Image (cartoon, rainbow, N blue to C red):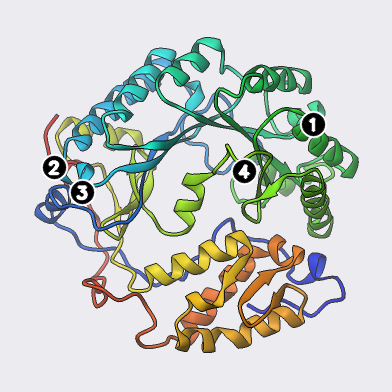
Amino acid sequence: MTGLPSPDPLKFAFTAKTSAHASRGGVRPLALDDKDWQAWWQTATEAEERALYIHVPFCKKRCSFCSFFENGANPARMSRYMAALCDNLQQAAKTPFALSAPFSAVYVGGGTPTDMAVDDLARLAETIQGFPLTQDAELTLEGRLNGFDEPKWHTALAGGFNRFSFGVQSFDTQVRQQAARIDDRARLLERLAELTRYDEAVIVADLIFGLPDQDDAIWRQDIADVMASGVHGVDLYQLIAMAGTHLDRAESKGKPGWAADSQQRASMYAYGAHTLEQGGWQRLSCSHWRRSETEQSRYNQMAKRGAEILPFGAGAGGNVHGHGLMYGRDLAPWHQALADGHRAPGMVMGRNPNAAMDALLRGALDTGRLALALLPDPLRGQLLPLFQVWQQHGLAVLTAERLELTLAGRFWSVNLQAGLFECLQLNPLAGAGERGPHANAVAVRPVEIVGHSVTGLRR
């Protein structure tokens, strides 16, 4: 949890990054009956900020590094799914729960949502407008540039989407081919130039460092390309080895090709961060930068700081009335449940009594800075020794007012979050969690949840 002492903490404070997210854990699945589930959708929210997450679990092609591939993008199969999804959304939008407070962000993720047909995209956009949205709501459509043609672009804009997040990963044609990506470098740059020419919406690109055959020279060119492409924001993500991917299988057969090790990936992160910031890009989090204030990355920041996020679709996750919710990925029971007027199979978690503080800590470390005045005295006293060791190990700078992660600390941010939550689990403080009407709620034994539809209403 403290990292290792090293003259070069950027490269050696930890052996590897093993996860994309960190949490305290310890909250168990909740036994929730049909009556309680339906009652949730008749009860007004207590959340201060809210978002929608809509999941489209289809892709044309499985990327070599991906462990999230769920379904091939068969057009008929996708259209059937989108029809059921929009029906489900329309029902939910009419409930007292949905209507009780506006949503300031909507994220349509996947999968590859941009693979949906233009008519399905139009219907989805219209359905989203049925929810109470704030005047400046951020509506993000995730996907890839391949297949996102002019009809889809204009349909999305007309429907209210104002932010688009594209998984570029690398501009280098050879690296892309190795990763099973589709378009080449020239086509990517051409399409990004077309989409960003008039600033009609915010365009964000994701890059991954550490891909097979992506050496330092190629990474430098990737950073130069993204800065010149016209995009408003960029995410820099480290490749994390995941079981079950094509890369994992290739490695087990001794055929992965050359790839950067953890130390070289650390150097790649440092190069990207320095180059973007020297070029005038502002860092919003440890992995996200923007070149203009039009990019807010609102949904991502809300998710980190514990906003209420209503999930829809097979495989979608979020939280409702303070309870974590994750729907199963299997399409067949998802369709059947909605057709029968039941909620799709999934898992509902008991309330986390420390949710508010956990979200504050996670959100702060994700940005790289934590104001110590936000911590109650007992918790601050408990965590200061850990923060002091982070400072000794070159991962943070600690003052009387704040904890500021160094470049090395930002690279290892998820490891630090995991270490912090491990510290809290090993040394719990009575009364340090959130207070309120649900502070003493406890989870009950895990059970399989079948339940009713997300609205409790029949189609």
Task: Check disc 2 and report the residue beneath it.
Answer: 456
Q: Nearer the viewer, residue 130 or 411?
A: 130
Circle 3 or circle 1, nearest the eye: 1
Amino acid identity at mark 4? Thr
Percent coordinates x, y for residue 443 in the rendering = 26, 71
Neighbours of disc 3 within 10 Å: few (<14), some (14-19), many (20+): some
Distance from disc 1 to disc 4, alpha carbons, whole Å, reads: 27 Å
Q: CA distance from mark 4 to mark 2?
A: 37 Å
Query: What's the amino acid at mark 3?
Result: Val
Residue to which mark 1 is pinned: 225
Residue 231 left/right relative to 147: right
Q: Earlier in the sequence, mark 1 or mark 4?
A: 1
The residue pinned by badge 4 equals 245
User: Disc 3 or 2, which lies upstream in sequence?
Assistant: 3
Residue at the extreme top of the image, as rendered: 151
Residue at 29% across, 22% down: 83
The amino acid at mark 1 is: Asp
